Image (cartoon, rainbow, N blue to C red):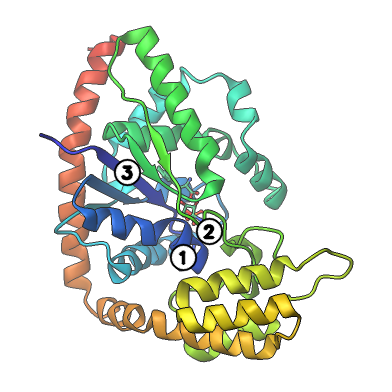
Amino acid sequence: MSKPILFSGIQPTGNLHIGNYLGAVKNWVTLQNSGEYDCFFSVVDYHSLTGNMTAEERREQITRTVIELLAAGIDPEKSTLFVQSHVPEHTELAWIFNSLTPMAELERMTQYKDKSTQQAKNINAGLFTYPVLQVADVLLYHGTHVPVGEDQVQHIELVRDVARWFNNRYGNYFPETDVLLTHIPRVKSLLEPTKKMSKSKGQGHVIELADEPESIANKLKKAVTASEGEEGSPGVENLLLLLKEFGSAGDYTAFSAAEKEGTVRYGDLKQVLAESIATYFADFRKKRAALLQDNTTVTAIMESGAKKAGDVAKETMDRVRKMVGVR
Ligand code: AMP
Ligand code: TRP
């Protein structure tokens, strides 16, 4: 019996942060290790062309993202880990899906609207059709399970829509896809705790998995706790959530009880949390540092991932070209 196919992707736009980790990557590792899925994980470099990075930054970041996924526990013996542009069928299938997708569906996408505000001087057509490339990523492998953070749910709904439009027009071929969320699908920013933690907001907003202990402590010192005129505090809630994930059960129980009683000292909470996060990712930092020195291993992993993914992608595209009538 073949296993259900799981696909997910991440842009090479910066180091992994704890939002990526708790919303997606930690779950990728758990799902991979469950042995229940045939897993594909992709560093989606073509998606990152829609942003403002330079070519040099991108080149470096692609490899670094692969390294960080390996250090976080993605195992190339168990999963297919590859770089999107190494498999050219992604963009070919995206073109076919572009021609099936109504403009109005893409105009509704909240990530497109957000990014258009963030990079108002660079609202390129790629930014608009970005979700269609994402649909191609998943369906090229017939992915039925997509573990992502909450901000991606709308895009995965489009995967279902496009599969349906394709199947109705050309014959039944693509499966129905479901999103897999974690219990923390949206980690909040340290400095603006009503918004999601995101690399695009700036360094002070995120804790990176690779951050050194002092850096984690410094960022947490500046984290917002009390917000004027608001009921409760989303900042404190976020910190407690992080303590629950990264700290000991005892610390979590003690600090959440103190918070309820109004006796909590935020300085202490931040210090304990900083130590817990630093310890949690000590092994990650070590593995990452070793892989950064080991170009040969990383290159070999990328090549073998591209080959495995490419074999599946070729089969799908051979079939799709026939179905749409260009062969
Ligand atoms: P990105 O870095 O935008 O390519 O995102 C990679 C993965 O991390 C996606 O599945 C996102 O949904 C997830 N993610 C990004 N930021 C957060 C966050 N603040 N909370 C939870 N998940 C997130
Ligand atoms: N758009 C996703 C993000 O910004 C990354 C992504 C690209 C992706 N293709 C995908 C996620 C396919 C899941 C499946 O996080």
Identified by mark 2, the residue type is Met
Q: Secondary structure at mark 3?
A: strand
* Quarter of the rendering containing residue 253: bottom right
Mark 2 against mark 3, which lies toward the viewer?
Answer: 3
Mark 3 and mark 1: Cα distance apart in space: 26 Å
On residue 281, which mark appears? none
Residue at (53% x, 33% y) in the render: 129
- Amino acid type of the residue tagged 3 in the rendering: Phe
Q: Is 184 positioned to the left or the right of 284 in the image? A: right
| Mark 2 closeness class: few <14, some 14–19, many ≥20 residues within 10 Å | some
Q: Position of residue 270 (x, y in %)?
A: 62, 85
For label 2, the SS is: loop
Q: Is mark 3 within 8 Å of ligand 2?
A: yes
Q: Earlier in the sequence, mark 3 or mark 1?
A: 3
At horizontal 68% and vertical 58% (from top left) the residue drawn is 195
298 sits to left or right of 49: left
Mark 1, residue position:
57
Q: Secondary structure at mark 1?
A: helix
The residue to which callout 2 is attached is: 53
* Residue 146 x/y as whole percent: 38, 42
Q: Position of residue 236 (x, y in %)?
A: 68, 73
Q: Are marks 2 and 1 in contact (CB under 8 Å)?
A: yes
CB-based contact (under 8 Å), mark 3 and mark 1: no
Image location of residue 4, percent across then percent down: 23, 37
Whole-Å distance between the Cαs marked 2 and 3? 25 Å
The residue that mark 3 highlights is 7
